[in-house]
Amino acid sequence: ALARGCSVLDDEDAIWAADEMDEARRREAKAIVEAQGRVLAPFWVDKYDREASKAWDRFYRRTSVAPYKDRHYLDVNFPGAFDAPRGVALEVGCGCGSAAAPILRDHAGWRVVAIDFAASAVERLRARRLDRVEVALC
């Protein structure tokens, strides 16, 4: 587990990232999954895949937007990511835009394409009327 206040990027054991998925990494990943055994029965996997968007939609409909403070971690965890004078960031699973809003506010030349599969989350983000953001339901 990470220490409180620690970024996953500060702990190399907490992340697994590389540019290519070679055969050795495929074997390693397969061995890890196989060692876990069956986590969920196929019925539940299919059910959760089918109903995930409904669950998130219900969550956003019954939860006020107040708990979702704008998240400013992208500049901290990825220093220099927004150094270009302009660009486009893609946010997958945007929710109500708590990560997109700081990008738009702090980086005037940047745009955000934000997508989510919860219709109520997309509605909330659109209601924020942020400039330079394209929001889509997927």
Image (tube, rainbow, N blue to C red):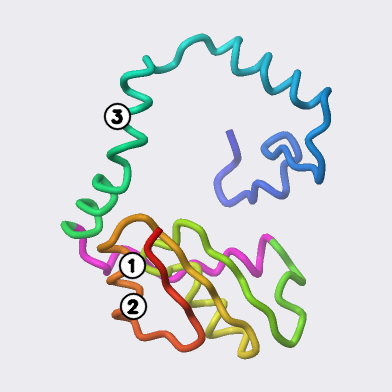
Label 3, on which residue?
47
Q: Please, what is the dominant secondary structure of the magenta stretch?
A: loop
- The residue located at (58%, 33%) in the rendering is 1
Q: Do the residues labelled 3 and 1 touch (CB within 8 Å)?
A: no
> Which SS class for mark 3?
helix
Residue type at mark 1?
A: Val
**Image quarter for residue 96?**
bottom left
Frontmost residue, 137 versus 80 = 137
Measuring from the top left, give residue 10's x and y in whole percent.
73, 48
Label 1, on which residue?
122
Q: Distance between the residues labelled 3 and 2?
A: 29 Å
Frontmost residue, 126 versus 16 = 126
Q: Are marks 3 and 2 in contact (CB under 8 Å)?
A: no
Measuring from the top left, give residue 100's x and y in whole percent.
50, 72
**Would residue 10 be found to the left or right of residue 7 on screen?**
right
Of badges 3 and 1, the one in the foreground is 3
> Which SS class for mark 2?
helix
Find the magenta span and give its range: 63-77
- The residue located at (46%, 11%) in the rendering is 38
Earlier in the chain: of badge 3 and badge 2, it is 3
Quadrant occupied by the C terminus: bottom left
Frontmost residue, 100 versus 112 = 112
Q: Distance between the residues labelled 3 and 1?
A: 23 Å
Question: Dot 3, how many residues are within 10 Å of its Cα: few (below 14), some (14-19), or many (20+)?
Answer: few
Label 2, on which residue?
126
